[in-house]
Amino acid sequence: MEGPESTGENLPIRFHPLLRAIALILSVVFHPLFIPLYATLLIMASHPIQFADFSGKARLAILGPVIENTIILP
């Protein structure tokens, strides 16, 4: 029998470039480091009354430490 199975070679699997691009985008978007940021944004969006008094700069002051501690520092 001919082929890589008979010779014991480990040949790399080639994927379509579009599939590789989609996989890269998904791995970046759903990276575990971004989960606390997504949770903070979800809380801010789902409870707007709790954050009604916050201006744009105050909301960034809330997101700043989350971004710093979960994305930049690790």
Image: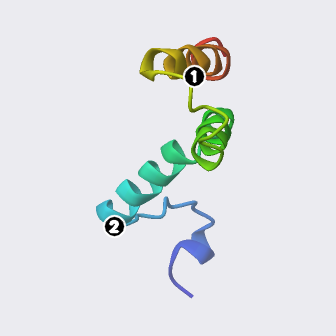
Tell us which disc is closer to us: 2 or 1: 1
Q: Nearer the viewer, residue 15 or 54?
A: 54
Q: Position of residue 72 (x, y in %)?
A: 57, 15
Residue flagged by tag 1: what amino acid is it?
Answer: Leu
Q: Residues within 10 Å of mark 2 (few under 14, many from 20)?
A: few
Task: Identify the residue shown where x is 67% and y is 35%.
Answer: 50
Q: Quadrant of residue 21?
A: bottom left
Residue flagged by tag 2: what amino acid is it?
Answer: His
Q: Residue furthest left?
A: 17
For label 2, the SS is: loop
Task: Identify the residue shown where x is 58% and y is 38%.
Answer: 41
Q: Specify whether 56 is left or right of 6.
A: left
Name the quadrant of the N terminus. bottom right
Q: Position of residue 14 (x, y in %)?
A: 41, 64
Name the quadrant of the C terminus. top right
Q: Position of residue 26 (x, y in %)?
A: 49, 53
Q: Position of residue 55 (x, y in %)?
A: 47, 21
Res 25 label: none
Say which residue label 1 marks.
63
Task: Identify the residue shown where x is 45% and y is 15%.
Answer: 57
Say which residue label 2 marks.
16
Q: Taking 22 as reference, is 63 above or below it?
A: above
